[in-house]
Image: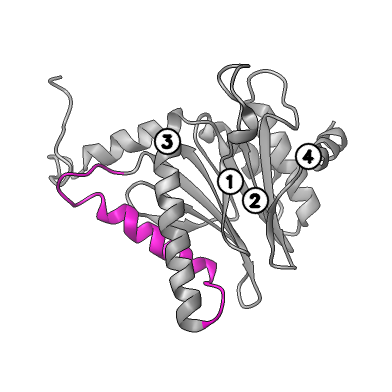
Amino acid sequence: MGDMNFSLTTFNKTGKLLQIEYALNRVQQGKMSLGIKATNGVVIATDRKVSSVLVDDAEYVKMQNITPSTGFVYSGMGPDFRVLTRNARKAAQKYFLTYREVQPLAEVVRESALVMQEYTQSGGVRPFGVSLLAAGYDKESGPQLFQIDPSGAAFGWKATAIGKNYVNAKNFLERRYNEEMELDDAIHIALLTLRESYEGEMTEFNIEVGIVGEDGIFRILTPAEVRDYLDEAN
């Protein structure tokens, strides 16, 4: 207990908020998720292997739509992700009712980052034990990929990974990423990156892949579509 710091709103001597460090440690224990921005879209992919054969994996999902053109995936604590998803959807609906247009991804990310930041300097709460990847496409900005961390920090990325073995995944992406790649190539790279550190056999039922293309519609690929991409990757 002596090396633990339970203060949320007080910096330690080295200038860190240790509860945020602990939240990041929880994220790194979660199953890996990654995202890649292509010239004509964005792909996000994640490991969704369940802990027991008795679990109904049809009910276990790690990706959610926020707006028709925006999707989230997480690594870390699933219940925390549900709270952030609900808040993001409410904010997106409020934006639509006010302006009669779909909320841009940058605004979606800003709203979620603000919520996560508020939980780092408020009494009686704890930081969210989750990091998010947000993928989207709009006519003005084209394809976009963001990462949001428990501190409330949000950054745009060309390709990134979160969760378990994220360092190895980022190193793999740095070697494989090409700014001229199209969406199909990005999907293949995403699957290869997942496979690099995947424990056991990777199938269409224990991973999840979501894409958004030039049509501006975010969707999760069906198991049959994922199987086709896995066969091509082989």
Determine the secondary structure under disc 2: strand
Measured as percent of width and height from the top left, residue 27 is found at 42, 35
- Could you give the CA–CA distance between mark 2 and mark 3, rounded to whole angstroms? 22 Å
- To which quarter of the image does residue 102 belong? bottom right
Specify which label sits upstream in the sequence, 3 or 1. Answer: 1
Q: Residue at x 48, y 48 (%)?
A: 132
Q: Residue at x 75, y 59 (%)?
A: 180
Measured as percent of width and height from the top left, residue 6 is found at 16, 33
Specify which label sits upstream in the sequence, 1 or 2. Answer: 2
Q: Residues within 10 Å of mark 1 (few under 14, many from 20)?
A: many
Q: Residue type at mark 4: give it.
A: Val
Question: Which residue is denoted by mark 2 in the rendering?
Answer: 36
Q: Residue type at mark 3: give it.
A: Met
Q: Residue type at mark 2: give it.
A: Ile
Determine the secondary structure under disc 1: strand
What span is in magenta? 100-127
- Could you give the CA–CA distance between mark 4 and mark 1, rounded to whole angstroms? 15 Å
Disc nearest the viewer among 2 and 3: 3
Q: Residue at x 57, y 50 (%)?
A: 64
Q: Quick one: 14 or 39, which is closer to the camera? A: 39
Relative to 58, is 113 above or below?
below
